[in-house]
Image (spheres, coloured by chain):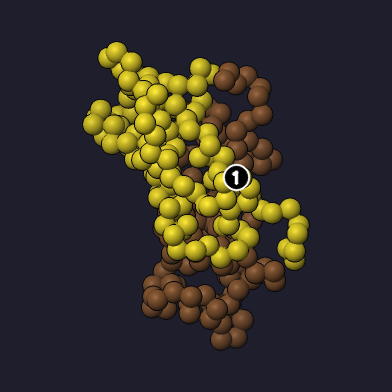
Chain colours: A yellow, B brown
Amino acid sequence: MSKQELVVLGQDEGGCCPTLLTEPMDDDQAVELAKVFKALGDPIRLRLLSMIASPAGGEICVCDLTPAFELSQPTISHHLKLLKQAGLIDSERRGTWVYYRLVPETTDRLAAILTRPTVAGAVS
Amino acid sequence: MSKQELVVLGQDEGGCCPTLLTEPMDDDQAVELAKVFKALGDPIRLRLLSMIASPAGGEICVCDLTPAFELSQPTISHHLKLLKQAGLIDSERRGTWVYYRLVPETTDRLAAILTRPTVAGAVS
């Protein structure tokens, strides 16, 4: 298994309800979380991530990613590196090729952060 | 009601399941969605958004936002403008002050985009 560069998104280990919509976020949390959103803030990286997340087999060869873009291999590699540094994808080299897969824990965490709490004190 | 600059996130009006984790995203969708994630890709804007989303009353005066940051009013205004252009917040001027509120439809949409589909063809 290749090493992961996962970002800690919020301090709640249980995975429940970190704080974007429920209370003011502290600076450290915001700095960490902003890195992940920044990685998503580019159309090429979003398309790469969607291609990586989609295959039924759970992973995709870099050799299947590159032909979908009119970009050089180094440019694609750079975007993939940023997604990996943000903890959104992981990779494994097997023989000639590198294979990429989604880190679903990270997207789960982002989805939770963006989900409104169910009632509990909210006034509409 | 002040004018909104909402971004269309995905073409599915029903709000169900646009495509980041289920199928390769097309370029137009990726360009629109990247704008919103880019707006979130900054710690100041994340803290502002969390402050705007948190108040029980559903809105916050710019006069309560600015003192929380060691930044000039024009800098805060610039960040608020980017959040508004991304469709994440809306604003209304009343008297001297501008009041900001979350546009929950946008964060709901982002949460849906980042939520894994429940089984249905996915192979683990």
Is residue B11 in view? Answer: no
Percent x, y for residue A49? 44, 33
Residue shown at 46%/52% (left/top)? A33
Tell me where residue A36 appears, x and y as whole percent.
43, 47
- How many neighbours does mark 1 have within 10 angstroms: few (below 14), some (14-19), or many (20 or more)? some
Q: Nearer the viewer, residue A10 or B37?
A: A10
Rendered position, A105 above or below B71: above
The residue shown at (66%, 22%) is: B120
Q: Secondary structure at mark 1?
A: loop
- Which residue is more in the foreground, B70 or A47? B70
Q: Furthest-top residue in view?
A: A95
Q: Residue at image x 58%, y 70%?
A: B100
* Residue B116 in picture, x, y percent from top left: 60, 33
Chain for disc number 1: A
Tag 1: amino acid: Gly
The one nearer the camera, A11 or B101, is: A11
- Residue extending furthest toward the front: A13
Q: How many marks?
A: 1
Q: Quadrant of the N terminus of chain B?
A: bottom right
What residue is rendered at 66% in x and 37% in y? B16
| Relative height, residue A47 to residue A114 (above, below) | above
Find residue B15 and report its image quarter.
Answer: top right
Query: Which residue carries the number 1 mark?
Result: A15
A124 up-or-down from A7: above or below: below
Q: Is residue B77 above or below residue A23?
A: below
Q: Residue furthest bottom?
A: B96
| Residue B72 in view, yes or no | yes
Horizontal and vertical percent position of residue A10? 52, 52
Q: Quadrant of the C terminus of chain B?
A: top right
